[in-house]
Structures are given as C-alpha cells and as structure tokens.
Amino acid sequence: MFAILLQHAAGAGEAEAPNVFNVDLATSVWTWVIFLALLWVLSRYAFPPILGYAAAREERIQKSLDEAKRVREDAAALLEQQRRELAEAKQEAQRVIAEGRQDAEKLRAELLERAREEQQELVAGARADIQRERERAVETVRRDAVDLALAAASKLVAERLDAERDRKIVEEFLSGAGSAPPRG
C-alpha cells in the first residue's frame, strides 16, 4: 500500500506543480490511516511508559515536597524548642549568678563578723595583758620603793630593825599612801 501511495504521489508531481491548498482525498485518507496507526502504536507501547514515568516523577516530586514540608516543620519545632531551652538556660544562669552573689554576700558578712569578733578578742586580750603588765609594773615599783625606803631609813636610823618587819611596815604605809588621794 505504501508503494501505491508513493507511485501516485510521484505521478501527480510530474503533471502539476504542487499546491498546498489543494486537497487530495487519497492523500488525506492515507494520512489519517497512518496517523491512527501511529497513535495506536504509541498508545500501546510508548504512552504507558511515558505516562508511568511522568506519574512516578510527579509522585517523587510530591513526596519531596511533603518531606521538605515535614523537615521544615520539624526544623521550626526544633528551633522553637532550642529557643525555649536557651531562655530556660538564661534564666537558670541568672538564678545561679544571683545565688552566687547571695552566697558571696553571706560569706562576706560572716567573714566580717568573724574579723570583728577576733578583733574584739584581740583588743580584750591586749587590754588584759596591759592591765597585768601595769599591775606588775606597779608591784615592781612598789617593791623598788620599799627597798629604797628601807635603804634610806636604815641609813637614817642607826640601829637596824628586822628587815622583814621593816618591809611590812613600809608596804602597809605605801598601801595606805597608794589609796589616799594625792596631795596637790
């Protein structure tokens, strides 16, 4: 058939000049037959794989879009969770800093109180030491005064009394003189 069509087309071409607007019934019929045969072959063998590939591609694209949407939502949820955790961590850090300041202030107050107590103890101890040293010095001065008075009295008095008795008399005199108000 195809050969007849070619002969007919070759014979017609020699007789007249081709014209695009001339409609030839035989050519139109054969064009439709070839078109329908090609359409049937394509629909039977080519279109199913092409449409299957297109459907699979569309499904992959939809899955990718769904996956991207899910990942974006997960990322947004994780971002929000990280923001909350960061805010909580900041609050915890501020709380720890505040507690540290309070503990440091408390420790400072305790150390100051201990230092004051130790200072008072040192001052009280120093005052007690000073008082003892003063009493010792006064006692030493009294003894030295008694000894000097005895030495002076023994030179003045030609006869010598008992040294122990002399000391007792002078100490009694000085004790009385020490408690009496000074003359001025």
Image (spheres, rainbow, N blue to C red):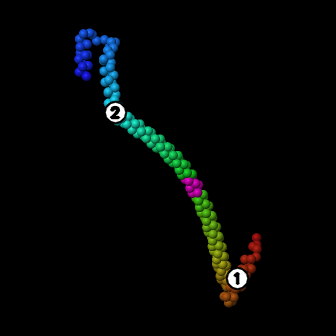
Along the viewing direction, whichever of 18 and 83 lies nearer the viewer: 18
In the rendered structure, the answer to whether residue 121 lies left or right of residue 179 reads left
Dot 1 falls on a residue whose secondary structure is helix
- Which of pointers 1 and 2 indicates the residue nearer the eye? 2
For residue 169, above or below residue 2: below
Structural crowding at the residue carrying mark 1, measured as other residues with C-alpha within 10 Å and reported as few (<14), some (14–19) or many (≥20): some
In the rendered structure, the answer to whether residue 6 lies left or right of residue 113 reads left
Residue at which label 2 appears = 44
The answer to whether residue 100 is magenta is yes
Q: Quadrant of the N terminus?
A: top left
Residue 108 visible in the snapshot: no
What is the x, y in percent for residue 75? 48, 44
| Residue type beneath disc 1 | Glu
The part of the chain drawn in magenta is 92-101
Structural crowding at the residue carrying mark 2, measured as other residues with C-alpha within 10 Å and reported as few (<14), some (14–19) or many (≥20): few
Corner quadrant of residue 34: top left
What is the x, y in percent for residue 135? 66, 76
> How far is the residue under mark 1 from the one under mark 2?
148 Å
Marks 1 and 2, the one that precedes in the sequence: 2
What is the x, y in percent for residue 121? 63, 69
Dot 2 falls on a residue whose secondary structure is helix
| Residue type beneath disc 2 | Arg
Q: How many marks?
A: 2
Along the viewing direction, whichever of 57 and 142 lies nearer the viewer: 57
Residue 171, numbered circle: 1
For residue 41, above or below residue 152: above
**Which residue shows up at 34% across the image and 33% down it?**
44
Along the viewing direction, whichever of 70 and 147 lies nearer the viewer: 70
Corner quadrant of residue 12: top left
**Which residue shows up at 52% across the image and 48% down it?**
81
Corner quadrant of residue 56: top left
**Which residue shows up at 65% across the image and 73% down it?**
128
